[in-house]
Image: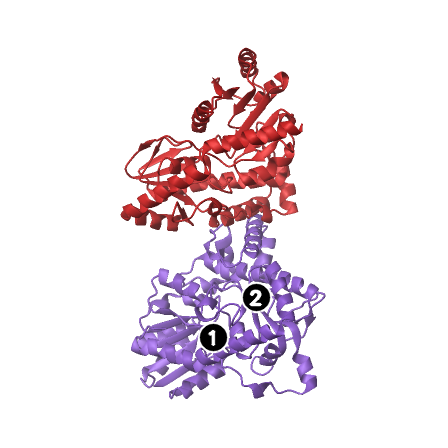
């Protein structure tokens, strides 16, 4: 089997290539830089060319890229995408509806929001990892999520009431980890006014209208994530900071998820554990389903708690190492990338068999 | 000891006085006008003079008054204050740091907050209740019928805060209004964690506090947000929450309410008006199958007085979750708590139909209050700490 992997410069792409190749699948890396995900004609021509030459059975990418889907539709090739980041707005592109698409989503609440956009073709698939070692540094390392920011534009100013209300929700959510209360607090009036005031930028006419409550939720989550990033940088006084893909691990690794990643651990956090890093992460819904807290990883409830835990684990090296070791074993057992890929192929076989 | 009791119109004042006497102290009561507290200089001078004769060994009083603290401080006389109200702004007065003070609060959350501000002589002490005797509930059938309910609630709906509402409306403070609404809605959704005080000070909040509650600014170290949270937001949340909960319960079950407030928006509830604290209220608690408690949101973790009075009257208590309960009582054995509206409705249904269990729980709660939480026992503990420095509570 031959797969074309459209690269977008993510660490997980290297890992996927390795695992697929181990399974005797030929992987052709399409390395053209993607400047615009929807209508970039140059990218499209090059991908068409490569596909014609290589004749793959499938095209893969680590996010859903409408233009890749367009190419696959033209050539009638399967397009497999695995959304492992918090950005998912391209799922509202009409290209999503094509039957050649099979979309896997690594975060459950994003999956719940979007599964109806192409029923039977969108699945939940938690992240997986194949980490064969990474540089380890002395000291405290802070890893933050880094993704291209979504754009929000304003049609008009909006009332003081709207912004006061938004500020109120943002502040409340800031106090609470692991449970999202944003959706519960959005009233009909706020929904109506927000719709008149704010819209997503950079979206074409072939996009479906996203439910406004999701837009507000994303807007508040993005705002909060940015505020918290600055705060945590200041509070942790980390020796190193990295954003996005991990390049190294520290003795103590702190991870703060994006507020849009509401359930479970994101890829980078699992990647840290797989590399044998001791992980302290903000409390998240569903963590307990996969890990034993304080045995395999450590969670913090707020910044005060985080500061205490950093001090504690700096002084308790043995305990820290023990947790890191157990965490690494847990990830290898429960988050093996090979297993995720096998599951994906299994789902594909079944789905294709039914059609 | 010769004790001066600063007496004012607080609930339980009679129990307080009797307990001090029962403990063998020589107690003098002085009727204190709380309104004149830290505003009337003449009154302050009188208080200082009264204590200057050196006749009293100790001053005792419920809640906390800066005027009393100052008078004690000037004369080097110990002041024992027992907080039972929340919110209580006076506790954030600078006089709270005087070394003569020993302050007891029924709310561990408030204790922690004061400790954080460097107040050293603050201790947790729950409220108390004198358990009623069986013969106090002997009534004829007609009277019994009058005080019987499936579920009852005694208390206010907290329709306070109109002056703040009006100021916001009049000055078009839309941002603040939006902010308030979001915070109130959010706090209503979240039980067991009070975050109102931790909110940030948004524009105009300080102006409102200074304009409407000027007496809470000078000489006080509480922030405008704290005042705003406790005197306005907490009551708004409580109002919204009580209305919502009472509506939900009364629509499914027979429910009575004892309150001075208008309850016309709760069409199914029977409003039986107010009820006397010392004589009639215990009857309501005793003869109701289920007594509901919905805590005022400015109380962080503490057990409200209502709960003690319910248990002391042998009533079955169903309450929202408050952390301090677990220091003294076992849930499901001595009392029952609910987590949210759905849980509450299920528990009402269950305990209405499980009479034996309900009675057993009420009995257990009663016995514990009787054994460990009478005014006498509680005051004895406080005096021990205040006088002998014995901190084993």
Counting residues from the start of the chain, the first of labels 1 and 2 encountered is: 1
What element does badge 2 sit on? loop
Classify the position of the N terminus of chain B by image quarter: bottom left
Q: Residue at horizontal 70%, vertical 84%?
A: B142
Q: Tag 1, which secondary structure?
A: helix
Of B23 and A310, the residue lying toward us? A310
Q: Is residue B293 above or below residue B147?
A: above
Give me the C-alpha separation between circle 1 and circle 2: 27 Å
In the picture of the structure, the residue carrying the numbered disc 1 is B34
Task: Give the numbered dot on residue A44.
Answer: none
Taking A209 as reference, is B223 left or right? left
| Colour assignment, chain B | purple
What residue is shown at x 65% (from left), y 46% (from top)? Answer: A189
Q: How many marks?
A: 2
Q: Quadrant of residue A281?
A: top left
Q: Chain of mark 1?
A: B
How many residues crowd mark 1 within 10 Å: few (<14), some (14–19), many (20+)? some
What x and y, as percent, mark residue B200?
47, 51
The answer to which of A272 and A156 lies nearer the viewer is A272
Give residue B294's mark.
2
Where does the image place residue A279, in percent across and percent down from the top left? Answer: 38, 42
- Relative depth, front residue between B90 and B113: B113
Residue A13: x percent and y percent?
46, 26
Q: Colour of chain A?
A: red
Q: Could you tell whether A330 is left or right of B134 in the image?
A: left
Q: Quadrant of residue A76?
A: top right
User: Please, is residue A145 above or below residue B358 in the view?
Assistant: above
Residue drawn 37% across the image and 78% down it = B381
Front residue of this view, candidates A266 and B267: A266
Asked if both marks, 1 and 2, belong to the same chain, the answer given is: yes
């Amino acid at each position: 089997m031959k797969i074309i992997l459209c690269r977008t410069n993510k660490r997980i792409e290297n890992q996927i290539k390795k695992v697929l190749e181990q399974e005797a699948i030929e992987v052709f890396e399409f390395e053209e830089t993607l400047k615009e995900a929807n209508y970039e004609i140059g990218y499209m021509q090059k991908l068409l060319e490569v596909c014609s030459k290589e004749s793959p059975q499938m095209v893969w990418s680590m996010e859903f890229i409408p233009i890749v889907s367009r190419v696959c539709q033209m050539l009638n090739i399967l397009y497999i995408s695995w959304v492992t980041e918090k950005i998912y707005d391209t799922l509202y592109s009409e290209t999503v509806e094509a039957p050649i698409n099979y979309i896997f989503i690594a975060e459950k609440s994003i999956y719940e929001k979007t599964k109806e956009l192409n029923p039977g073709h969108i699945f939940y698939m938690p992240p997986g990892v194949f980490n064969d070692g990474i540089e380890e540094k002395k000291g405290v390392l802070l890893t933050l999520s880094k993704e291209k920011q979504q754009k929000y534009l304003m049609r008009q100013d909006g009332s003081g009431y709207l912004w006061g209300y938004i500020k109120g929700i943002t502040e409340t959510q800031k106090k609470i980890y692991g449970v999202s209360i944003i959706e519960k607090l959005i009233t009909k009036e706020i929904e109506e006014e927000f719709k008149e005031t704010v819209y997503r930028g950079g979206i074409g006419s072939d996009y479906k209208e996203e439910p406004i409550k999701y837009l507000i939720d994303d807007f508040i989550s993005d705002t909060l994530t940015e505020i918290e990033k600055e705060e945590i940088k200041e509070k942790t006084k980390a020796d190193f900071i990295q954003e996005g893909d991990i390049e190294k691990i520290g003795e103590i690794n702190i991870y703060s998820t994006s507020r849009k990643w509401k359930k479970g651990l994101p890829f980078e956090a699992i990647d840290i554990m797989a590399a044998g890093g001791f992980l302290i992460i903000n409390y998240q819904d569903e963590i307990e389903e996969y890990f034993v807290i304080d045995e395999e990883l450590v969670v913090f409830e707020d910044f005060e708690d985080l500061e205490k835990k950093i001090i504690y684990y700096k002084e308790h090296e043995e305990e820290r190492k023990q947790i890191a070791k157990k965490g690494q074993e847990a990830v290898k057992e429960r988050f093996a990338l090979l297993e995720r890929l096998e599951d994906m192929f299994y789902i594909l076989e079944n789905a294709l068999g039914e059609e | 000891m010769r004790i001066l009791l600063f007496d004012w119109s607080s609930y339980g004042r009679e129990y307080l006085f009797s307990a001090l006497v029962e403990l063998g102290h020589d107690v003098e009561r002085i009727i204190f006008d709380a309104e004149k507290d830290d505003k009337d200089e003449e009154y302050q001078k009188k208080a200082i003079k009264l204590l200057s004769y050196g006749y009293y060994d100790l001053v005792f009083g419920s809640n906390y008054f800066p005027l009393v603290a100052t008078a004690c401080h000037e004369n080097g006389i110990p002041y024992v204050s027992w907080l039972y109200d929340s919110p209580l702004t006076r506790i954030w007065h600078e006089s709270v740091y005087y070394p003569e003070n020993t302050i007891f609060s029924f709310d561990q959350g408030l204790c922690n907050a004061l400790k954080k501000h460097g107040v050293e002589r603050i201790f947790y002490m729950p409220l108390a209740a004198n358990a009623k005797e069986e013969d106090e509930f002997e009534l004829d059938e007609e009277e019994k019928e009058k005080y019987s309910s499936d579920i009852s609630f005694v208390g206010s709906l907290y329709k306070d805060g109109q002056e703040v509402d009006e100021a916001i409306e009049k000055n078009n403070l839309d941002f603040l209004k939006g902010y308030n609404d979001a915070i109130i809605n959010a706090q209503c959704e979240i039980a067991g964690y009070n975050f109102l005080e931790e909110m940030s000070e948004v524009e105009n909040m300080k102006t409102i506090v200074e304009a409407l509650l000027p007496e809470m600014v000078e000489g006080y170290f509480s922030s405008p947000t704290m005042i705003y949270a406790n005197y306005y937001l907490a009551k708004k949340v409580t109002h919204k929450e009580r209305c919502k909960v009472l509506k939900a319960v009364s629509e499914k079950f027979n429910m009575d309410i004892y309150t001075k407030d208008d309850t016309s928006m709760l069409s199914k509830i029977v409003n039986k008006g107010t009820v006397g604290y010392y004589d009639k209220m215990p009857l309501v608690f005793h003869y109701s199958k289920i007594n509901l408690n919905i805590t005022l949101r400015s109380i962080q973790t503490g057990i409200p007085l209502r709960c003690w009075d319910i248990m002391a009257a042998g009533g079955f208590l169903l309450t929202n979750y408050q952390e301090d309960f677990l220091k003294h009582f076992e849930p499901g054995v001595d009392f029952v708590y609910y987590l949210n509206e759905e849980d509450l409705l299920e528990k009402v249904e269950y305990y209405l139909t499980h009479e034996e269990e309900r009675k057993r729980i009420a009995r257990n709660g009663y016995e514990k209050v009787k054994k460990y939480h009478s005014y006498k026992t509680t005051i004895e503990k406080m005096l021990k700490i205040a006088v002998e420095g014995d901190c084993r509570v």
